[in-house]
Image (cartoon, grey):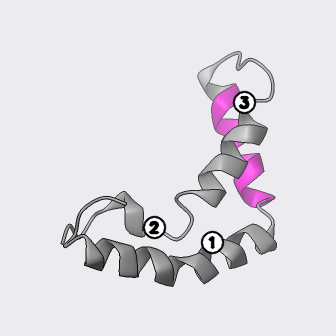
Amino acid sequence: MALNSPDLSPLDYAGYDWLCSRAYHTPISSLDDFKDRVCTCWENLDQEITDKSIDHWHDKLKAVVRLNGGHI
């Protein structure tokens, strides 16, 4: 099983989608603008999103084990 599998990160799906939907809501004007948006969004990440992601993490782990370490 891959130790660095992105499939095993609890926030990989819900957190990433939430972050992108807020960071990219308007065109990004510069690298500093992008960094500021990502940091601001991360600081405002709703605890409910984190909780839901962690709740589903066990199912993701089981799926990766069923696939002998393959991607889900």
Q: Residues within 10 Å of mark 2 (few under 14, many from 20)?
A: some
Residue at 32 percent across and 72 percent down: it is: 64
Instruction: Please report whichever mark, 2 or 3, sits nearer to the chain's N-terminal start.
Output: 2
Q: Eyeballing the image, is 69 above or below 39?
A: below
Name which quarter of the figure residue 29 lies in.
Answer: top right
- Using the image, tell me which numbered label, if any, was put on residue 53: 1
Q: Amino acid at mark 2?
A: Ser
The mark lying in front, picked from 1 and 3, is: 1
Q: Amino acid at mark 3?
A: Tyr
Q: Which residue is mark 2?
A: 9
> Quick check: 2 left or right of 8?
left
Q: Secondary structure at mark 2?
A: loop
**Picture coordinates of residue 61 (x, y %)?**
39, 79
**Picture coordinates of residue 65 (x, y %)?**
27, 79
Q: Which residue is mark 3?
A: 24
Q: Is residue 39 magenta?
A: yes
Q: Quadrant of the C terminus?
A: bottom left
Question: Over which residues does the magenta segment extend?
Answer: 33-44
